[in-house]
Amino acid sequence: MTRTEITTAYAERLDDLKVITLTDGEVWSARDLMGFVGYIEWRKFNEAINRAIASVNASGMDASGHFVPAAKSSPMPNGGHRQIEDVELTRYGCYILFQNADGRKPEIAAMQSYFAQQTRRQEIAAPAALPTDYLSALKALVAEVESTAALKAQAVIDAPKVAYVNEFLASDDVVLFRAAASELGVAEGVLRDTLLDAKWIYKLAIGKRWSKSKQKEVTEVEYRAGSAHADKFRLMPQHNAPRYHNGQVKQTLYIRSESLPAIRRRLNHFINSKAVAA
């Protein structure tokens, strides 16, 4: 799939997640969005929500109308249910949330690209019909001034994130190993082991660090593409991620989407050879 096709697919799935209410119109559950955009822990996703709320408030708008605290029923292993924390978001709330979420996640990058496209379409769209009376004209003017001010303030906040996505994520059609493994229908560990076994990738020792959990010194490693298969991968620095203990910038190896068919064939060969050996 091309980057445009991936973005379109995510946009369609976003619309599938919306809920239409009688009082608030279309809203999204943050709990539903969490898995959709690649988050596993509510704590980390809630941190992004709080950053988004602070971002809206900093722009001079009131975030309370776009991020509404709610509760969601969650099934228990014993068959019962419990109430868990949730937040209902408007479409604008979703946009701000994705701008304040982890742009290194391909799902977030796709949604940022989608909203950027939507904003551009609105900019070049034909102007709306003119108001027919003074009160309507005044309301329209106030709404336009507030919207323009909010967009300008948000643009200043989003500028570093947009630059990061454009330089390191949106410049090529690449996916994380986790996303590729999901697409190929295997565990991420199986995918990595297959590519390591085929020498398409290898581990590079970055340095040593002390592990509190293991109570010993451990080696920090990153993955690199083998020289014969460098065209199938792309290495990108993660400037927004915490650096290694020695100050070195972390780098993540991504898979080029166009390479997935070749990787699928190699994966099938690896699995079949294991089955024969067994």
Image (cartoon, rainbow, N blue to C red):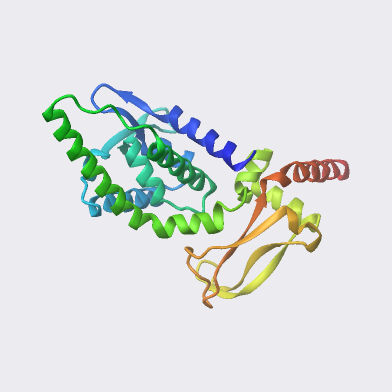
> Can residue 219 be seen here?
yes
Which residue sits at x=52%, y=55%?
166
Question: On screen, 1 above or below 203?
Answer: above
Using residue 72 as the reference point, say whether residue 61 is left or right of it.
Answer: left
**40 or 92: nearer the eye?**
92
Which residue sits at x=23%, y=25%?
23
- Residue 214 locus on image (x, y percent): 55, 68
| Quadrant of the rendered image containing residue 74 | top left
- Residue 238 locus on image (x, y percent): 53, 63
Which residue is the extreme one toward the right?
Answer: 276
Question: On screen, 200 above or below 250?
Answer: above
> Can residue 38 be seen here?
no
Using residue 127 as the reference point, say whether residue 244 is left or right of it.
Answer: right
Question: On screen, 132 above or below 70?
Answer: above
Which residue is the extreme one toward the top?
Answer: 22
- Residue 20 locus on image (x, y percent): 33, 24
| Quadrant of the rendered image containing residue 138 | top left
Which residue sits at x=43%, y=42%?
120
